[in-house]
Image: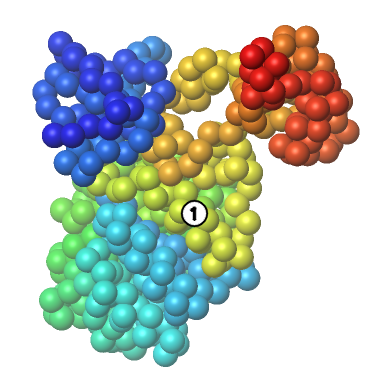
Amino acid sequence: MRFSTDCVVTWHTDPTVVALRSVRFIYNVARRVLIQCLHKTTRPLTPVRGVEFFQGTLDSTDEIESARVFDTTLRDGEQSPGTSFSYDDKRQIAAILDDMGTHVIEAGFPVNSDAEFEAVRDIASSTSATTCGLARVVDKDIEAALDSGVEMVHTFVSTSDVQIEDSMHATRDEVVQRAVESVERVKAADVTCMFSPMDATRTDEQFLIDVIEAVTEVGVDWINIPDTCGVATPTRFAAMIEKVCAHTDARIDVHAHDDFGLATANALAGIEAGADQAQVSVNSIGERAGNAAYEEFVMAVESLYQTDTGIDTTRITELSEIVEDKSGMATPGNKPVVGDNAFSHESGIHAAGVIENSDTFEPGVMTPEMVGAERRLILGKHTGTHSVRERLHELGFAPTDEEIRAVTRRVKDYGAEKRRVTVDHLERFAKEAGVERQTEREEVRV
């Protein structure tokens, strides 16, 4: 096998222990052998998922054995106020989700419009992932979903009293009847059926169990437990999932909303409590404050729980940027995993540590390379001499220690005025401080 000249071969007596400095790519070729490379090598190498979890106060990584990913960007994500995906948008996003290895793609709400129906149908016929269509417990919704050719129909009905009475204007008995009939209709078509008791976290507990047992008796394949209004907490949600698991043999899926910023935490708590799958959306877009984030959930499972999702995480940043563009919803700079600041450093102490070893002030178990991003050193008010030295060297300058201190002062003063320090500014500061470029200094020496 041929390796890049930038590769280092390391032998380990214990293949389960990996203690590495930050490298771009890590390959596991055979037992006891690790290949560390600065660049991707030939295809026969198999990438290792991540770095061994750091030993310390949080060193337990055996809470879950597996976690499936159900993406609802194209359905719940599109319900973000002001967001509308075109037919081509949906096809493009679905293709990337499929290529990445996403387990289920909820392509849309087929009964909603002819254009929606066509998009769902075409996604179902062109992807290898399981394609899902949403349907209320209404005959025309079920028929439209089945006609679209999806492999899974996700049917739902409100179960909380406030929604039953003031949204559906129905009774509990009618809710159970409609739920059972809809599941039976989907199963009669020999299609996988997922059922959701909408607003489950605000539903009377005994009634929720009654509904779950009723759809279980008619053969439902999946039961999704949605925190529709985002009122769950991780501990309470986990306890709820444990109770649900005790009353059904269907597989459990969870759907968490982010009204209190707990959606991803609740989704992970659901998985720890026995759920097999979580519904997520890219950049956490969705109704109101959004859903559990695709990128946060996947990377937490991969890096913190050390569990392989089967997702190609190196395309997460690419996917995020496309969804940001197509949805019209800007991604905050401090957004975990995919925000501009996720792997950026300005503080002098942090930047100095990262230059020496990126694990000092980054998670270590998640690197920018793992999500297809790049690490950045930002210049500004908090910048230290280490960052300035590094950036000047990158630009071809050969500064003395005194010159570095002078340029750093200029950078800090400029950044303190809330102005962005660009590479052009840095070059100007360096020239004004009399810093020579490396080639100039070598010429003088000669």
The C terminus lies in quadrant = top right
Q: Looking at the image, can residue 225 be seen?
A: no
Q: Is residue 336 left or right of residue 57?
A: right
Q: Residue at x 12, y 27 (%)?
A: 30
Of 362 and 433, which appears nearest the observer? 433
Q: Quadrant of residue 269?
A: top left
Q: Is residue 26 left or right of residue 92?
A: left
Residue 235, compared with residue 282, is above or below; it is above
Q: Looking at the image, can residue 362 be seen?
A: yes
Q: Residue at x 63, y 44 (%)?
A: 333
Residue 58: x, y in percent? 39, 18
Residue 154, compared with residue 209, is above or below; it is below
Q: Residue at x 20, y 29 (%)?
A: 28
Q: Is residue 32 left or right of residue 204?
A: left
Q: Which residue is mark 1?
A: 320
Q: Quadrant of residue 12?
A: top left
Q: Is residue 98 left or right of residue 190?
A: right
Residue 437: x, y in percent? 69, 24
The N terminus lies in quadrant = top left
Residue 347: x, y in percent? 68, 22
Of 310 and 209, which appears nearest the observer? 310
Label 1 residue SS:
helix
Q: Amino acid at mark 1?
A: Ser
Q: Residue furthest front?
A: 446
Q: Residue at x 15, y 69 (%)?
A: 218
